Image (spheres, rainbow, N blue to C red):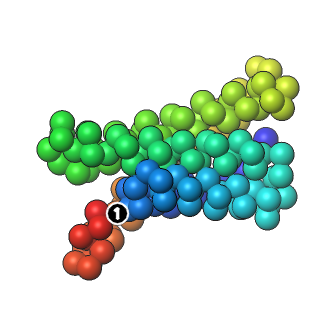
Amino acid sequence: IGYFNLGDIFVLCGAWLLGPIFGASAAAVGSALADVIMGFVAYAPATFVVKGCIALAASLLFPVLLKLCKKDTPARLLSAIAGEAIMVGGYFLYESVFLRLGMGAAASLPGNTLQAVCGIIGANLLVRILMANKTIRKYF
């Protein structure tokens, strides 16, 4: 049932850095290609949609949340949580309906949740590191 990776760190950072169109496109294509290369071809269509939706949600929610929170860290955290919730739910739906695993798809929930938590933490840490660079900071 899938595999664990840290790609969501880059999906989220790409969303915040590249915006909704380019961020979602990069997340969708890059992540689906990773599935194909790693031999998880059955997951590539779901990954294309799910990772694109993560990036789209995170990139669209971030500026709205920034206005509400007035600080970038809580806004990034909340937008990442929303995006990663899409990932956990999206793969559960795909596995249960399209791969016909039914409730057996629940077996992937802990792994996907752990991947989501690592992606949220990792993306927020990477953004902090990148923001230490003046040239890069202007894009965040």
Q: In this view, does 87 lie to the left or right of 136?
A: right
The residue pinned by badge 1 equals: 127
Q: Residue furthest front?
A: 21
Q: Residue at x 80, y 21 (%)?
A: 102
Quadrant of the rendered image containing residue 104:
top right
Label tally: 1
Q: Quadrant of the C terminus?
A: bottom left
Q: Where is residue 20 in the image (x, y as percent from the top left)?
A: 44, 51
Q: SS at mark 1?
A: helix
In the foreground, 11 or 104: 11
- Is residue 120 shown above or below 83? below
- Is residue 5 shown above or below 42? below
In the foreground, 107 or 86: 86
Q: Which residue is drawn at 33% across and 71% down?
A: 130
Q: Is residue 133 left or right of residue 23?
A: left
Q: How crowded is mark 1: few (under 14 residues within 10 Å), some or many (20 or more)?
A: many
- Is residue 83 shown above or below 133? above
Give the amino acid type for the residue marked by disc 1 in the picture.
Val
Q: Residue at x 35, y 40 (%)?
A: 61
Q: Which residue lies furthest to the top in this view?
A: 103
Q: Which residue is drawn at 71% across and 42% down?
A: 46
In the foreground, 83 or 111: 83
